[in-house]
Amino acid sequence: MSPVLYHDGAFPPKTFDWPRLLPLIGPANAAIARYAGLLEGIPNPDVLLSPMTMQEAVLSSRIEGTQATMGEVLEVEAEGGPIDESTPKKADIREVLNYRAALREATRLMDILPLSQKLVRQTHRVLMQGVRGRSKDPGEYRRIPNWIGPEGCTIDQARFIPTSAEKIPAAMTAWENYLHVEAPDILIQLAVIHAEFEAVHPFLDGNGRLGRLIVPLFLFNRGLLARPCFYLSEYLDGHRDEYYAALLAVSRIGDWTGWCAFFLRALTEQAKSNQQRVQAILDLYNMRKGWIAAETHSQYAVRALDWMFERPIFQASEFRDAAGIPAPTAARILRVCRDNGLLRELRAGAGRRSAIFCFPELLNIAEGRDVF
């Protein structure tokens, strides 16, 4: 079968099958609104949503072929020190950590820049810093052909061939302009934005992850969310074949409506899942806040709990040194939490090597299943 070619001249789409999309638009907007309302009521969102941000980084990277789990990433991060690429697993972990760093950088840039090519290129630099794609011009549009297909395939064996390199600047300018038009529906606009970015494939590497990262940035930019915290990769990872087929059909047969229908269903289901997970994290926080205060009788109890929520796998020595709690009190809090099951010891301390603890309840909520 011949490769599908980029849809030159067909962006932005001129028409949609609105009768097919209208029944999906309302539920998607309602689900996102309910999720947004929950987000606005969360104290310390940077702390409480940290595990979900990490899980999104893991799942978005997994779609591109990495194999690292959230537990593996957090444990390596807890051990401290530079993360090299001496093994495939370590290389995967570095890519996941870069995704989280890229999301944070993009969020910071949103305070000073519009959602734009400039922001995307600067975020791409962070995404590709020091990883396997670092030799592929981080932050620069590709200047050579690229294609998508089985690893090692030739261009003739590819499933899809994006736009040619010399047309990327014009294609990305058209994409940026479409970001800011007044479209009939914001979520349909977002669906088109994501599909077009993936089809143009402007960078040599990192396009899939960056395209998914644009989703929460756009929702935040257009006021549907108070923070760029929307975690879509769980649904896309679970429906990977349908995801790729719907994207491919845009260029193959011009099926923008089919793609938008898939994307609206993804937004609806993922918003419901995100809401349930965030509510579970908030309930856990409120329950454990009272528990840790009663069990430790310490003025530092809530500070300790916040530390554990932000770093659900950590070294005991790091907690004692950096949590802002007197060392004897920090040691006692760790002991109480371990002995009563809030924390579990992943690695015992030995000699100068510090113990590593994990927060199983929180990690299992973020994973969506019992893993720890």
Image (cartoon, rainbow, N blue to C red):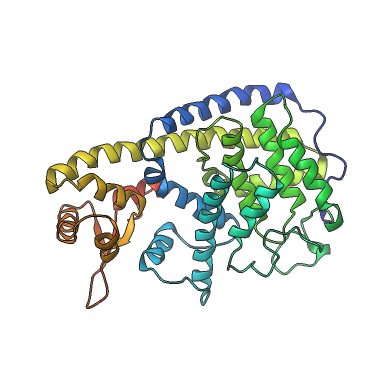
Looking at the image, which residue is at 59% across and 41% down?
217
Give the mark count: 0
Q: Position of residue 115 (x, y in %)?
A: 65, 41
Query: Which of the two residues, 18 or 289, is positioned nearer the viewer here?
Result: 289
Can you see residue 270?
Answer: yes
Q: Position of residue 46 (x, y in %)?
A: 41, 44
Q: Quadrant of residue 114?
A: top right
Q: Quadrant of residue 292?
A: top left
For residue 202, side relative to residue 242 (left or right): right
- Image quadrant where one finds the C terminus: bottom left
Q: Residue furthest front?
A: 112
For residue 360, side relative to residue 224 (left or right): left
Q: Position of residue 117 (x, y in %)?
A: 71, 47
Q: Is residue 143 above or below residue 340?
A: below
For residue 227, side relative to residue 144 (left or right): left
Query: Which of the two residues, 370 or 109, is positioned nearer the viewer here?
Result: 109
Q: Position of residue 320 (x, y in %)?
A: 24, 61
Q: Is residue 32 above or below residue 345?
A: above
Can you see residue 246?
Answer: no
Looking at the image, which residue is at 24% across and 55% down?
343
Q: Quadrant of residue 183?
A: top right
For residue 180, side relative to residue 278 (left or right): right
Query: Which of the two residues, 73 or 50, is positioned nearer the viewer here?
Result: 50
